[in-house]
Amino acid sequence: MTDLTNMMKDKPQIGVSACLAKQPVRFDGCFIANPFVNNECSEFFDLHTICPEVEMGLGIPRPVIQLRDFDGEVRLVFSKNPEKDITNEMREYSERKLDALPPLDGYIFKKDSPSCGVFNVAVKNDKTGMRKRNGIGIFAQAFKDRFPEVPTEDEGRLNDKGIRENFLERVYAHYRWRQIDSAVNPLQAFRDFHKNYKLILMAKDNTAYRQLGRIAASVNKNNFMQVRQEYFQLFMQAMSKIPSQGHHVNVMMHILGYLKDHLNKKDKIELLEWFETYRENRVTRITPLSLLQHHFNRHENEYITEQYYFSPFPGKLMLPQ
Ligand code: SF4
């Protein structure tokens, strides 16, 4: 199946909240040694560590800051001195920093931070003192606004197997997409990209799969720049979906069709039984996929061999089973 190491000239580029990568930049001068960031991510990605609060000049140590809701307007302020509003400074820093960043394929943010948190950050109501977990850090928001197609996650959510898998699929898709520009024939590289993602798209979003197929079929050297942007927006939206077991079984049935002339009845029944065992959540997807792979090793099929469905990213990046 697709060999990731052979096709990649360098590594995916990932932004990381600096405190997750053992840099002592937190308000109290400490760090958080996130094992995924410091082990697997360091091995497979080029990491770009960023601490917005230190880089904008708040210093170490520094007073704690928070998001606070003033009559519906969320501002970044010092927790013990809420008149001191640093929202504009953080926004200005963010724009400058984002201007200077190299192209990134993903970003892992520190959870709960009023600067870096990307999901459910606490926002304190100035009048009632109540906290709602519905905010997003100011730097994280600026990043998402500037780079809507770049996958972002928070370190806490990456401990969920499905969320981690989805994040990694999108990181590697984004990375492979960037390789199109440096290809000898970018138009052909775009067509290959679409072809090799077909089975993943089929699993994630059948409607988008058909729409993307129509867009890819319409591309030519005159409309390439315009069509590729339209394609990529829809592609990354489809990639953000997490397919059900049933959707994966549909794709595996489709793959089985490519073996129909090669397998005997006993082999087909064995595969179908494993598909059902997977659908019932009694084994992981690796089991039926490995068996399919075993059969394709003996009955090679170029289209299937090149599909990223079997290896969207290096398996070592996943959580242990
Ligand atoms: S969460 Fe962000 S701003 Fe806070 S210490 Fe970590 S990198 Fe710096």
Image (cartoon, rainbow, N blue to C red):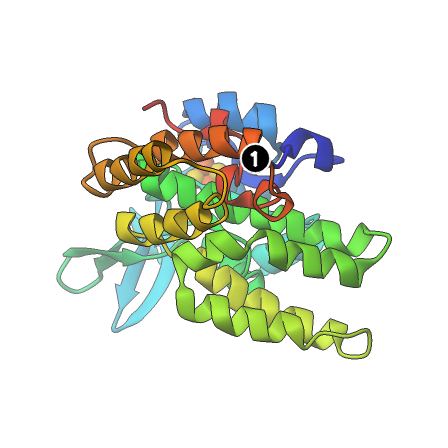
Seen at 56% across and 45% down, the residue is 304
Seen at 79% across and 59% down, the residue is 186
How far across and how far down the image is residue 243, in percent? Answer: 34, 52
Query: Which is more toward the observer, 74 or 244?
Result: 244
Seen at 52% across and 37% down, the residue is 311
Image quadrant holding the C terminus, namely top left
* Residue to which mark 1 is pinned: 299
Image quadrant holding the N terminus, namely top right
Reply above or below: 295 against 114.
above
How far across and how far down the image is residue 242, in percent? Answer: 35, 52
Outermost residue to the right: 184
User: Left of 179 or right of it: where is 198?
Assistant: left
Reply above or below: 128 against 219.
above
How far across and how far down the image is residue 188, in percent? Answer: 77, 59
Reply above or below: 224 against 26.
below
User: Left of 182 or right of it: where is 296?
Assistant: left
The yes-or-no answer for disc 1 within 8 Å of ligand 1 is no
**Residue 138 visible in the current orientation:** no
**Residue 278 visible in the current orientation:** yes
Seen at 81% across and 51% down, the residue is 182
Classify 10 Å Cα crowding around label 1: few (below 14), some (14-19), many (20 and above): some
Query: Which is more toward the observer, 317 or 268?
Result: 268
User: Left of 183 or right of it: where is 124?
Assistant: left
Query: Which is more toward the observer, 209 or 101?
Result: 209
Amino acid under label 1? His
> SS at mark 1?
loop
User: Left of 87 or right of it: where is 46?
Assistant: right
